[in-house]
Amino acid sequence: MLLIIDENTDNIRLDLYLAQLYGDISRSKIQNGIKSGKVLVNGEKKKSSYNLKFGDRIEFENLCEDKVLKIEPENIPLDIIWEDENMAVVNKPSGMLTHPTPLETSGTLVNALLYKYGENLSDINGEFRRGIVHRLDRNTSGLLMIAKNNKTHEYLAQIIKDHKLVKKYHAVLKGDYPKDEDVIEIPIGRHKTQPHKMAVTDDGKPSKTILKVLERFGEATYVELTLVTGRTHQIRVHTSYKKHPVYNDTLYGAGMGKVKTEEQVLQSFYLQFAKPFSSEIIELEIEPDEKLSKVLNYFRNRRV
């Protein structure tokens, strides 16, 4: 298997990274696999303590012999919002993984993309991430760009790096957010003791979120969030740090509210970008999904 480290998954120990992928394999088994040469970074053996860097290429054999690591195309319906010969924009539902892991190799967006597009997907980021340029958390829904070839993948990755992709999210936050508009500019890094989480850290990467209040309910606030940077879990970490975590985001301190949903009430609803190899500007926006609508309707009905 081949995986390439992106800018949001670097600065983590090699063994911890693989432990996150597998989940149910002991650290000692993973470390033994690294020591025996079953794991290579940029074609070389590394120690378990090696800190991964942006662009590192990890090649590894199956560390869990009782699991077959093969990604099969699956006929899963796709909500395609826009596409041309080079790319597509899909609306990923909440509850779906963006790409497979060694623990979950079916039911992901990549499985659906393989069925729809076959080999017409970029493979820069390896077989597990065919076509995937950027990601959404499992329980975050909304718009994702898909590259149908490597040249387009490189183009889209570059506009993300140059902050030329406009990404906006809708969220319901816990509590009454104190400002109508806010700029949250706080560094984000890997959590020191829980590597599956991110946190505000002094040595973290610069991170910037622009927040605008759309509607107030007293015990909750409906907001629009624009990502200036795109760190892992950025919105969830920033709003949690401000003591107003995303509603039902149990990982970052919100707890489960009165309206039960599938974790965080967060949707990527808007994208704006220049069409690949063209000056045409593509602007896409979708309506609130079922989860967001459910929570908004609950609070709106209580206010009447």
Image (cartoon, rainbow, N blue to C red):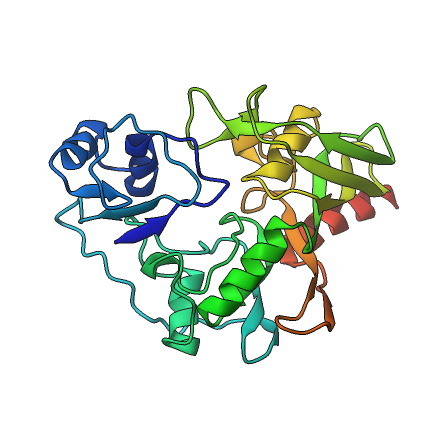
Asked if residue 60 is positioned above or below residue 286 in the image, the reply reads above
Tell me where residue 22 appears, x and y as whole percent: 28, 41
Number of marks in the rendered image: 0
**Image x and y of residue 100, in percent:** 36, 55
Task: Decide which of 122, 271 is in the foreground and name it.
Answer: 122
Left or right for 169, reference 110: right
Looking at the picture, tell me which residue is in the foreground, 186 or 265.
186
Q: Quadrant of the N terminus?
A: bottom left
**Residue plotted at (18% across, 27% down):** 28
Q: Residue at the spot x=65%, y=59% of the render?
A: 289
Spot occupied by residue 30 in the image (x, y as percentages of width and height) = 20, 34
Q: Is residue 104 above or below residue 192?
A: below
Q: Which quadrant of the view contains residue 186?
A: top right
Q: Is residue 92 visible?
A: no
**Residue 284 higher or lower than 246, as above or below:** below
Give left or right: position of 123 versus 45: right
Judged left or right of residue 278, residue 189 is left
Residue 278 appears in which quarter of the rendering?
Answer: bottom right
Measuring from the top left, give residue 271's x and y in whole percent: 69, 60
Residue at image location 64% in from the left, 28% down from the top:
240
Q: Foreground residue, 54 or 21?
A: 54
Tell me, yes or no, if residue 2 can be seen here.
Answer: yes
Figure check: 69 above or below 174: below
- Residue situated furthest bottom in the rendering: 85
